[in-house]
Amino acid sequence: MTKLNKLKREEVKRSFSAALHTFVNSLTEHVSAEDGGWTVKGFIDIYKNIYTISSDTKIVSKILEIHLFPQILQFAEENNFSIVLAESQNWYPDLSFVSKENSAIKFAVDIKTIYRDPDFSGHGNGFTLGSHGTYFKDRTSTKNIQFPYGEYAGHFCLGIIYTRSDGKDLDETEIITVRELDDKTDMPQRIGQRKITKVENLRSIASVIKDFQFFVCEKWQLASDRQGSHNTANIGSITYIEDILKGNGVFAKLGEDCFDEYWMNYGLTTMKRKGKTITINRLEDFLDFKGSQKLKDLIIPMITKKKG
């Protein structure tokens, strides 16, 4: 195993990023029908009953990951990488790409799903970008991470933006039989409390999500300066979709080193302001603390959610 110097890390990261960008441009056709709806319609049992999918984001996210996994495996094979899956559900990252030629070349890829917020025009629901806890601060730690953070040449998000269907044509309690699969003339009208609906073909079943848009960014380019959740040490994302697609997070002009330093010190460093001690949990305060006044002009402001 040959260790990577900084120049080599940047070189392999650029190459991997370019390949990943090309790859995501082809993904829509794998998940989307002609009308823009998701090609996954539900779960099927051995009796060919189809059970409609809940719009719950965790369920949708997991099924999307499974749906795309064959294409991800193919991408890895074509680019001479092996994929190592996270050993535990809450470990970082979702996927570790390890070069078959040099195992020192590793990339972290997290799959992120974002639905367009119907109440706030141009925004998504936001997402988390991994922990800023032990493994982020100590780049040699193996706690809750597949490989030590410092061993990855780059940290990427493969993102899927979608629109939730409005629900008029969806019933999560519904069971569907499809005549093109098997015309069950003797099928009962209900199974337990769930009604059974007959449709002509699979395309007749309403999709729970639609209008897919894929993107790839390094995770620091998508970061905000705020936690993604109140009760866990997760890095939060920006939410304005146009900025997400461009990788235009608050650190975009400041760089990855500033992102790393800020989040390593988040909630730990204190400073004096007007005679009071405050904990630093805003980027402006952090740059004030460092005496980097000029850098404050490089902070990209987050576009806040506005109805309409």
Image: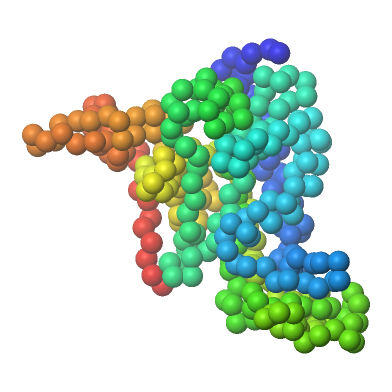
Q: Quadrant of residue 32?
A: bottom right
Image height of 185 relative to 146, above or below:
below
State whether residue 128 is above or below residue 118. Answer: above
- Residue 99 placement, left or right of 142: right
The x and y percentages for residue 304 are 36, 58
53 relative to 263 in the view: left or right: right
- Image quadrant occupied by the C terminus: bottom left
Q: Is residue 14 visible?
A: no
Colour style of the rendered protein structure = rainbow
Q: Quadrant of the N terminus?
A: top right
Q: Please name whichever residue, 197 or 163, is drawn nearer the observer in this view of the structure.
A: 197
Residue found at x 38% / y 70%: 307
Corner quadrant of residue 293: top left
Residue 140, position as x, y percentages in the image: 52, 20
Report the label total. 0
Residue 280 appears in the figure:
yes
Q: As displayed, is residue 172 above or below residue 188?
A: above
Image point 75% across, 44% down: which residue? 72
Residue farthest to the top, as pictured:
2
Residue 253: x percent and y percent? 42, 37
Q: Which residue occupies 76% across, 30% down?
A: 81
Outermost residue to the left: 275
Q: Residue at image x 71%, y 20%? A: 103
* Picture coordinates of residue 251, whole percent (x, y): 41, 38
Q: In the image, is 275 to the left or to the right of 153?
A: left
Q: Nearer the viewer, residue 70 or 27?
A: 70
Tell which of 23 and 277 is nearer to you.
277
